[in-house]
Amino acid sequence: MDAPPLRYALFYLCYFAALGAHAPYIGRYVDARGHGGYVVGAMLAIWYASRVLGPPLWALVLAQTRRPGRWFVGGAVFTVFAFGGFVPARSVPALLLVMAVFGLSFNALLPQFEAMTVSALGAGSSRYSRTRLWGSVGFMVVATAFGALLDRIGSLAFATATLPLMALMAASAWPHRLDRHPETADSLEQAGHLWRRPGVRRFLVVAMLMQISFSAFYVFYTLHLQAAGHSGASIGALWGFGVLVEIALFWSGAQLFARYSVHALMQFCIAASVLRWLITALYPESLLLMLAAQTLHAFGFALFHLCSMRRIETFFPGRRAVKGQSLLYGFSSGLGGVIGAGLMALMWEQGGGRAAFLAGAAVSVAALLVLRRGQPLP
């Protein structure tokens, strides 16, 4: 199938643009509602848990229909209405309920769309990688501009301001209403037996610890910088700059694997994250140092992700790759995200952003120790 990539790039652009408004600023919105760090942490824990539960539940629905494209559009429309629940929500139970419903629907869409895109464009083609890149562009543009917008209209307008982006995401799903049935990914439970493959457990523990260390960034970075006196425009620019260096490394980072081993690069990525969290914890008032810390996002996130994909290719070759991806996604992003959100919420309540990001640095050190334990991974 020689499908034009424009409609695929458009959905990636709109989906991650909506995520660029939601992910960096939901904590700011909850804080403006008068709720503390524990509530922010609970919201993010539900968000990460939905990344484990949403895709397999959605796969069960898709298995019963011959028109997955129409269900995809329906799921996108439902996501808009689910997010709309944030507009009237005030109490903690209401916010948690809306986050659960919204997270389950929003996080279920991307795995299905990835399968549809790979089926149309081919996973290994340059068309796929350059089409997928538009997702990072959408996130960067919105995350950069949204902070300044909330400065103008107020943090309490977060839900109303984000709703049009969710609607654009649903509209961009419409051209895919006739797309063919994708191959659904295995659930974490179905891939569980692969846990026993040599080296897999150590790799997954390292990936989980890295996700936990990033939780302070995902949950409290905006509030940490806001408390240090930075404006919404500056905070948005820092989010956008981090994604910009991420895009640059994704575009050219493959060249590093010709010179260095995956094991050595992973150690470097984790060490870069330790330095990044220390700078963020100790010097949040300095915009220059925050820019330097965000530069390290290219290594701690983007290069580490590329290393992880190489590891999955080694551990789960051929047809087993889908099961390996499912195991990695559920174990690191799901379990690690839930643990990290709870841990960083506790640290935030005890000592603010300084304590949370110092905890992130400590967890990164633990990841480095686990990686260096024993023989290098194959």
Image (cartoon, grey):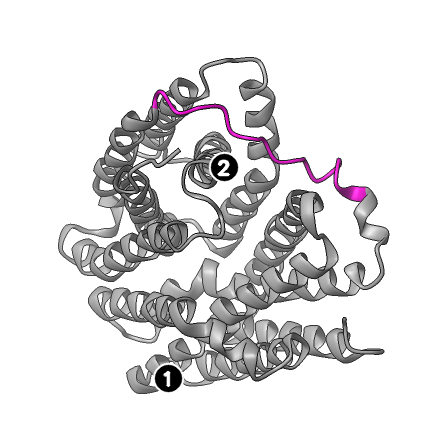
Asked whether 41 or 279 is in front, the reply is: 279
Say how many tags the image has: 2
Q: Residue at x 60, y 73 (%)?
A: 359
Q: Amino acid at mark 1?
A: Ala
Res. 326 mark: none
Residue 115: % across, % down: 50, 37
Horizontal side, residue 230 vs residue 180: left or right: left
Q: CA distance from mark 1 to mark 2?
A: 36 Å
Residue at 45% across, 62% down: 220
Quarter assignment of residue 49? top right
Instruction: List the single residue furthest toward the left.
Output: 152
Residue 37, image x, y percentages = 49, 56
- Residue 197 screen position, x and y as percent: 84, 55
Count neighbours of disc 2 (C-alpha within 10 A) and say few if under 14, some if 14 to 19, many if 20 or more: some
Q: Nearer the viewer, mark 1 or mark 2?
A: 2
Q: What's the magenta region?
A: 177-192
- Looking at the magenta stretch, what is its main secondary structure? loop
Asked whether disc 1 touches disc 2, contact meaning CB atoms under 8 Å apart, the reply is no
- Residue 240 vs residue 226, the one in the foreground: 240
Q: Where in the figure is residue 233, as x and y percent of width and height?
A: 20, 66
Dot placed on the residue nearer the N-terminal end, 1 or 2: 2
Q: Is residue 183 above or below residue 236?
A: above
Q: Which residue is mark 1?
A: 292
Residue at the extreme front:
2
Q: Indicate whether residue 189 is drawn in magenta.
A: yes
Which residue corresponds to mark 2?
Answer: 115
Mark 2: which amino acid?
A: Ala
- Quarter of the image holding residue 67? top left
One can see residue 11 in this view: yes
Q: Is residue 273 visible?
A: no
